[in-house]
Image: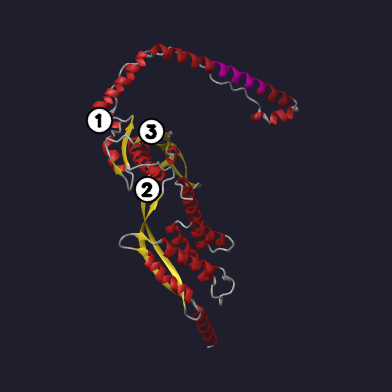
């Protein structure tokens, strides 16, 4: 009975101090700024996709024939290069042989210092001289033309792939246009040999052994503006290796399927990269804020912000009225000054503090009010976090840094 009364008392105590909130939810289509904006751009662009992949079997045979003819035409140069490579290999062999002989000499000198009994016990560890294999020069013969094995060839319809994977969001593709031309080139597929080794998950090696290999399809982007090179470089994430693993050896053997999948993934990464670089990408944001209102404690000034938020966002027209939203932010910032996270009875206790911080941040991000965002992040930096609070704060910091960088690039700061 005493325990029941005690539990009831605890619930009554929590009920007395529980804070009431007005919850406001709305969706808004925000625009992600480009990290490398193009000045005086009207929005029209021309985009092309190229690679060394054939579009069909006829083109594959033509490319194979052309490659063979080029090799034959440059055969004399190839022989000179082949002989030079052999001479380099011979010099490396001689240097490695000398190094191993010297190392063996030193090891034997140490071994000979041992007594007869010690030598007998160390017979298995007695130094051995193992020399590298001597390179042999073989004069290559002109190769005969062989038709490519089309079963192992990935055909790539460049126009179809371009239309499926590459598009600047929020902008219009115009052809022809001389203002902005985006050229995308897929480099040849790069794949490592197949190995049977312990599987890795999240950089942790497991005990299970699987067949695996690493691979990548690197993509290069060139952007021309008014005939001048505006940007050229590799799409960063496509230069990193990804992995395919399976207990079924045949799956990892199927290079053609791995290659086709890798190309599609690289084009998705390329599209994100181009949009981040020069695009104005629409982003649907779901805003959820909690505004403290009067219950046991007086929150009259906070209740005024409800109308400010509701009138500061035209949800139908997807329009903001920053002055109203910033006025609400100012009121919330004043409330934050009286925060006491250790006192649950405080008007701005821990629960109210985090609700205000998240609300200020989300609304300030809409209005690009970086000063308010920075104030919130500074206050959060002095707080002892719980796990879920830390995760959200880390995300907020990353978003803030990205927004500041992009606003500076767009001359908005």
Q: Nearer the viewer, residue 140 or 113?
A: 140
In space, the residues marked 3 and 2 are separated at their CA atoms by 31 Å
Distance between mark 1 and mark 3 Cα atoms: 18 Å
Q: Which numbered disc flags the more N-terminal residue, 2 or 1? A: 1
Disc 1 on helix, strand or loop?
Answer: loop
Q: Is residue 187 above or below residue 167?
A: above
Mark 3 surroundings within 10 Å by alpha-carbon count, few (fewer than 14), some (14 through 19), many (20 or more):
some
Marks 1 & 3, CB-CB < 8 Å contact: no
| Furthest residue in direction bottom, as rendered | 1
Return the mark for residue 280: 2
Residue appearing at x 53%, y 82% in the figure: 13
- Classify 239 as above or below 412: above
Measured as percent of width and height from the top left, residue 372 is found at 50, 60
Q: Which residue is mark 3?
A: 189
Magenta stretch bounds:
89-102
* Residue closest to the eye, 341 or 324: 324
Judge by depth and name the residue closer to the eye, 160 or 5.
160
Instruction: Please state which of the two labelled residues, at mark 2 or mark 1, is closer to the viewer.
Output: 2
Badge 2 element: loop
């Amino acid at each position: 009975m005493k325990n029941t009364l005690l539990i009831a008392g605890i619930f009554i105590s929590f009920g007395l101090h529980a804070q009431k909130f007005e919850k406001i939810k709305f969706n808004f289509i925000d625009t992600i700024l480009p990290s490398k904006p193009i000045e005086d751009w009207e929005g029209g662009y021309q985009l092309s996709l190229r690679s060394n992949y054939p579009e069909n079997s006829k083109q594959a045979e033509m490319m194979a024939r052309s490659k063979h003819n080029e090799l034959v035409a440059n055969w004399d140069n190839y022989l000179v290069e082949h002989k030079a490579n052999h001479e380099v290999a011979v010099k490396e062999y001689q240097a490695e042989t000398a190094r191993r002989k010297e190392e063996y000499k030193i090891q034997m000198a140490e071994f000979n210092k041992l007594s007869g009994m010690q030598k007998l016990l160390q017979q298995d560890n007695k130094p051995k001289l193992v020399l590298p294999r001597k390179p042999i020069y073989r004069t290559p013969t002109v190769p005969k033309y062989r038709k490519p094995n089309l079963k192992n060839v990935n055909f790539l319809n460049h126009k179809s792939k371009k239309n499926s994977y590459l598009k600047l969001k929020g902008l219009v593709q115009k052809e022809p246009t001389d203002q902005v031309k985006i050229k995308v080139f897929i480099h040849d597929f790069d794949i490592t040999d197949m190995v049977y080794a312990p599987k890795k998950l999240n950089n942790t090696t497991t005990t299970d052994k699987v067949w695996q290999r690493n691979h990548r399809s690197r993509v290069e982007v060139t952007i021309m503006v008014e005939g001048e090179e505006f940007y050229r470089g590799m799409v960063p994430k496509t230069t990193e290796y990804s992995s395919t693993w399976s207990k079924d050896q045949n799956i990892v053997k199927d290079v053609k399927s791995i290659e086709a999948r890798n190309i599609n993934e690289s084009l998705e990464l390329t599209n994100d990269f181009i949009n981040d670089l020069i695009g104005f990408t629409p982003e649907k944001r779901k805003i959820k804020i909690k505004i403290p209102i009067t219950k046991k404690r007086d929150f009259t000034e906070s209740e005024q912000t409800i109308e400010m938020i509701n009138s500061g966002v035209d949800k139908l027209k997807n329009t903001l009225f920053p002055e109203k939203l910033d006025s609400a932010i100012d009121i919330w910032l004043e409330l934050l000054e009286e925060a006491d996270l250790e006192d649950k009875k405080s008007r701005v206790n821990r629960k109210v503090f985090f609700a205000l911080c998240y609300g200020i941040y989300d609304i300030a991000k809409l209005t690009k009010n970086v000063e308010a965002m920075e104030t919130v992040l500074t206050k959060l930096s002095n707080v002892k976090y719980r796990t879920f609070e830390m995760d959200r704060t880390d995300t907020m910091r990353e978003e803030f840094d990205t927004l500041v960088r992009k606003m500076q690039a767009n001359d908005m700061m």
